[in-house]
Image (cartoon, grey):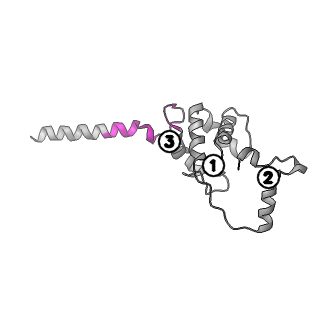
């Protein structure tokens, strides 16, 4: 009686091991179009941008609650090497190179659905200046307003 039980246990262990190694919900395979954008967001993007799109480092922007359209445009610009800001292209050109349009749309949908980071109290003058830039941009330096791309 022990032999069939041992064989069943071995079979169960091998099945669990095999499914764990190939489970798409636990993958960092950027080149695999079968991996969903949400999985990539949680397994890859979260390393820099946080699981909920709220980065803990000033080197990486918050993605939470950005508009999906904005995020898609940015990812496609990185993938096509037309976005070349020095802080981003170093990482993002390689990471985005093999993303499919569907994965990009999934990533954008995931991060746009997250709650924005909580605001912190600040100096009223700086808050007012930031709101002016957000609404109107900085005409003297041809800096566009934030609301056009990032939305309300």
Judging by the rendered image, the residue that carries numbered circle 1 is: 63
Q: Position of residue 8 (x, y in %)?
A: 20, 38
**Residue 65 position in % (x across, y down):** 62, 50
Q: Is residue 27 in the magenta section?
A: yes
Look at discs 2 and 1 and give the one toward the viewer.
2
Q: Position of residue 135 (x, y in %)?
A: 79, 52
Let me know if residue 34 is in the magenta part: yes
Q: On residue 39, which mark appears?
A: 3
Asked whether disc 1 touches disc 3, contact meaning CB atoms under 8 Å apart, the reply is: no
Mark toward the start of the polypeptide (3 vs 2)? 3
CB under 8 Å between callouts 2 and 1?
A: no
Residue at the image position 73 percent from the left and 34 percent from the top: 82
Q: Is residue 83 left or right of residue 117?
A: right
Q: Nearer the viewer, mark 3 or mark 2?
A: 2
Question: Does label 1 or label 3 sit earlier along the sequence?
Answer: 3
Neighbourhood count class around disc 1 (C-alpha, 10 Å): few under 14, some 14–19, many 20 upward: many
How many numbered circles are shown? 3
Q: Earlier in the sequence, mark 2 or mark 1?
A: 1
Q: Quadrant of residue 95?
A: top right
Magenta-drawn segment: 16-36
Quadrant of the rendered image containing residue 54? bottom right
Q: Nearer the viewer, residue 13 or 75?
A: 75
State whether residue 98 appears in this view: no
Q: Secondary structure at mark 3?
A: helix
Q: Residue furthest front?
A: 152
Question: Which quadrant holds the N terminus?
Answer: top left
Give the CA distance from mark 1 to mark 3. 16 Å
Mark 1 secondary-structure assignment: loop
Q: Which residue is mark 2?
A: 135
Task: Indicate whether 149 appears above or below 101.
Answer: below
Q: Is residue 139 visible?
A: yes
């Amino acid at each position: 009686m022990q032999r069939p039980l041992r064989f069943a246990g071995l079979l169960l262990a091998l099945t669990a091991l095999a499914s764990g190694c190939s489970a798409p919900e636990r993958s960092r395979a950027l080149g695999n179009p079968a991996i969903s954008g949400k999985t990539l967001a949680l397994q890859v993007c979260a390393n820099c941008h946080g699981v909920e799109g709220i980065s803990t480092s000033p080197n990486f922007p918050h993605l939470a609650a950005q508009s999906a359209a904005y995020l898609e445009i940015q990812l496609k610009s990185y993938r096509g090497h037309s976005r070349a800001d020095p802080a981003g292209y170093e990482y993002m050109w390689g990471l985005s190179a093999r993303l499919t349009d569907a994965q990009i749309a999934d990533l954008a949908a995931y991060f746009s659905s997250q709650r924005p980071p909580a605001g912190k109290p600040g100096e009223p003058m700086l808050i007012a200046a930031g709101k002016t830039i957000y609404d109107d941009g900085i005409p003297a330096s041809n800096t566009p307003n934030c609301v056009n791309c990032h939305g309300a």
